[in-house]
Image: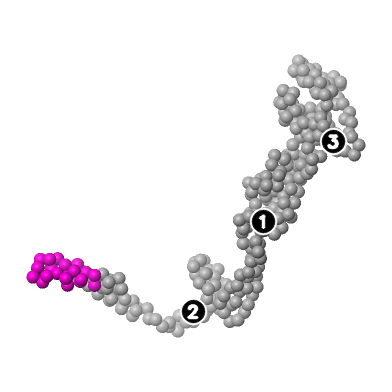
Amino acid sequence: MERAGYEADRARRPDDAVDPENRLVARALERPWEEKLVERERLTEDVARFQADHPRHLSGPERDQIRALAADLPGLRDSRTTTGADRRTIVRLLIESVELTRAVESERIAMVVHWRGGAVTRHEVRQGLRTYRGRGGLEKRRARILELRGDGLTADASAEVLNREGYVVARGDRFTGHRVRLLLVRFGQAGVPPGVRDVSDLPGPDEWWLSEWAEHLGIEPIIVHRWRWSEWVHARQLRGPNGRWIVWANPGEVKRLRRLRAFEIKYRGRRTPPVELTRPAKRVVPKGSTTRSPSGGR
């Protein structure tokens, strides 16, 4: 109605300013003014009808219905017909004020809620942060990630365990394999395979990663695995269901295995390799260290 009244007044001003003797222009200006007046009158009648059909005062049954809803606020809030805006309105009607206090550079926020009627409740909430610096328990989280990595879990498997144990990332989201990999890079573990807890798990003297050793001999890794299954070579596996394999072979072993491969190529399974080509040399372990048998056990 206000907008219609404004537009009617605006259409009247040019008509008031025109020379009355200029009847042609006056009639042209009167036409839009009359249209605006008709629109204003129509809206006035619509509002009058609306106010007659919807009185400002509630009826008795309507008041009883509101009281029934107020007696079961959880049911009202959880109803499928209650919108998000409705739920926020309910909360605003119940709460007088809220006090928030955050510890410096922490995700923990102390919250005090003053309810209408005088009740006061205290809560603690967590808010996601942009970095891990302010989040409590960073060292505990780091130790757990490195522990899972040392147990041989992949980044994706580690993320599942962290989520199950209640760990969250800086912004409060769930862990993913990608996020675990980013943290491993941050912790200086980039390129370190799963199953490595310390430097003793990495290849030592005369030890090779199986794939690299196969490349050194010019053979396929599956051949080295076959030798491992036959216990023709010393090998050990890192922790985890799919831990990488490490092969031990000093210069004498390298020569033996080259001869073994030449024998296999020559006879192509028609003859069994002699014992001197299939028996791995006894490995001398320095005092205080450990090794594994050809089959991968300690």
Residue sitting at the far left: 21
Residue 229's x, y, as percent?
A: 79, 30
Residue 181's x, y, as percent?
A: 66, 45
Q: Nearer the viewer, mark 3 or mark 2?
A: 3
Disc 1 secondary structure class:
loop
Q: Is residue 30 visible?
A: no
Q: For the point 76% across and 42% down, which residue is it?
A: 195
Specify whether residue 173 is painted magenta.
no
In which quarter of the view is residue 107 placed? bottom right
Q: Amino acid at mark 2?
A: Gln
| Residue indicated by mark 2 | 65
126 in relation to 256, above or below: below
| Residue indicated by mark 1 | 133
Q: Which residues make up the magenta segment?
A: 9-32
The residue lying toward the viewer, choosing from 70 and 92, is 92
Residue 179's x, y, as percent?
A: 64, 48
Dominant SS in magenta: helix
Q: Nearer the viewer, mark 3 or mark 1?
A: 1
Disc 3 secondary structure class:
loop
Query: Left or right of 98: which side holds 23?
Result: left
| Residue indicated by mark 3 | 292
